[in-house]
Amino acid sequence: MQDKVELKVHSVSEIVGNSEVGIVVLMDKDEMMQIAIVCDKAMKETLHMHISKQKVCNTMLADVLANILLNQVGYKCELIINDIVDGVYKAMIVNTETYQPVSLRASDAILMHIITKTPIYATMQLMKRQAVPVTAGSISMALPYNALSDKMLQDAMKSAVEQEKYEMASAIRDELKKRGKL
């Protein structure tokens, strides 16, 4: 198995000016490095509900299924965020007895971690590529272009051109070209 870094959920918020997109910030246990996972509005709201421990969560499908899997079936697992492709983080749930992986969305892995306290990790390779240092007292963090969806990149490029931030627009254009979207 690959080297990995254990993570913890630091915060769930939204991109300023876009309530439709959530950002989940995960930090390593030493709070030295962090990555930001983009999710949709529904997942952002679900994560908020779970973090604030709303009673209704106990009967939501994700909670019920996760608890059946872990408590009744005895499935032993860990969650690993292992890649990013075209702005979408990839994750897997790995059976710790058979090492059998099953793919799932990174945001669903985060939700399962919150519901069940199952350990969540990122591969060391992904952290080296995507993580940024934690800045004490900061309320924001930079998102790498490759962590944004195609639509978000297109909107950001349009905005950068309108604001005459041509270096930023060029970097965004390069990411879109790399994805074959230009």
Image (spheres, rainbow, N blue to C red):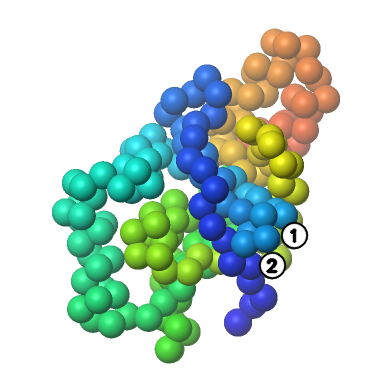
Q: Who's the residue at 28% across and 66% down the image? A: 66
Give the spatial CA distance, label 1 vs label 2.
Answer: 6 Å
Q: What numbered label is drawn on residue 124?
A: 2
Q: Position of residue 40 (x, y in %)?
A: 41, 38
Residue 37 appears in the rendering = no
Q: Specify few, some or many for label 1: CA neighbours under 10 Å numbering under 14, 14-19, or 20 or more.
A: few
Q: In this view of the protein, which residue sits in the foreground, 129 or 8?
A: 8
Q: Is residue 68 above or below residue 40?
A: below
Question: What residue is at 50 percent from the left and 31 percent from the top?
Answer: 14
Q: Position of residue 70 (x, y in %)?
A: 29, 75
In the visual, does 50 lie left or right of 125? left
Q: Residue farthest to the bottom?
A: 97
Total marks placed: 2
Task: Name the residue that disc number 1 marks.
Answer: 128
| Residue at the spot 42% in from the left edge and 61% down from the top edge | 113
Query: Which of these two is toward me, 8 or 76?
Result: 8
Q: Amino acid at mark 2?
A: Met
Say which quadrant the C terminus sits in: top right
Do the residues bearing badges 1 and 2 touch, measured as CB atoms within 8 Å? yes
Which one is in front, 158 or 178?
A: 158
Callout 1 secondary element:
helix
* Residue farthest front in this picture: 137
User: In the rendered view of the protein, which quadrant contains the N terminus?
Assistant: bottom right
Q: Report whether 112 appears left or right of 163.
A: left
Task: Indicate whether 1 appears above or below 170.
Answer: below
x 42%, y 69%: residue: 118
Residue 164: horizontal and vertical position, in percent? 78, 12
